[in-house]
């Protein structure tokens, strides 16, 4: 079965950390740019980050730069999103998406081939 499965979400206090995983099955991630998105209650989905299929370069929305790090382990067919210094405004459902619509994260993807189901991150004291 072709799918992306996220894991690693949870409830964390402000200032805490989580590592989200995005594991692929039924296909290999090597040739896909992998983007992370998040959607908070009552808000539109927001693009968070991209990791390039070409050279592993990473790109982030300004609000998470310096706090979020995405990485990929092609041997494990998994992409990660390390999220540090969490803030209450980071609370959202985080989803990963794989695309061949572009390679290198340099433009907005016209489509995504695969989406994960999402994992909830809640930042609260």
Image (tube, rainbow, N blue to C red):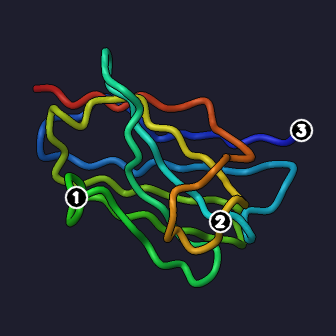
Q: In whole angstroms, how far apart are the C-alphas of marks 1 and 3?
A: 35 Å
Name the side, left or right, on which 3 lies relative to 17: right
Residue 102 is tagged as: 2
Tag 3 secondary structure:
loop
Q: Is label 1 or label 3 in front?
A: 1
Q: Which residue is mark 1?
A: 62
Secondary structure at numbered mark 2: loop
Q: Position of residue 119 (x, y in %)?
A: 48, 32
Residue 17: x and y, percent?
26, 49
Look at mark 3 in the image and give the residue it sits on: 1
Q: Which class describes the residues within 10 Å of circle 1: few (<14), some (14-19), or many (20+)? A: few
Sequence-first disc among 1 and 2: 1
Q: Is residue 105 above or below residue 49?
A: below
Of the two numbered discs 1 and 3 on the same chain, state the one appearing first in sequence.
3
On screen, residue 42 above or below 23: above
Camera-nearest label, 2 or 3 = 2
Q: Residue at x 73, y 70 (%)?
A: 30
Rendered residue at 45%/42% (across/down): 37
């Amino acid at each position: 079965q072709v799918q992306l499965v996220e894991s690693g979400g949870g409830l964390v206090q402000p200032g805490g950390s989580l590592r989200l995983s995005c594991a692929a099955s039924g296909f290999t991630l090597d040739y896909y740019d992998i983007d992370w998105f998040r959607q908070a209650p009552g808000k539109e989905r927001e693009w968070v980050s991209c990791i390039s299929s070409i050279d592993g370069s990473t790109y982030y929305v300004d609000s998470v730069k310096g706090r979020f790090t995405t990485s990929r382990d092609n041997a494990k067919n998994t992409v990660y999103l390390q999220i540090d210094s969490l803030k209450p405004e980071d609370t959202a459902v985080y989803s990963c998406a794989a695309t061949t619509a572009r390679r290198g994260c340099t433009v907005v993807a016209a489509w995504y081939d695969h989406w994960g189901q999402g994992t909830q991150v809640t930042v609260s004291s």
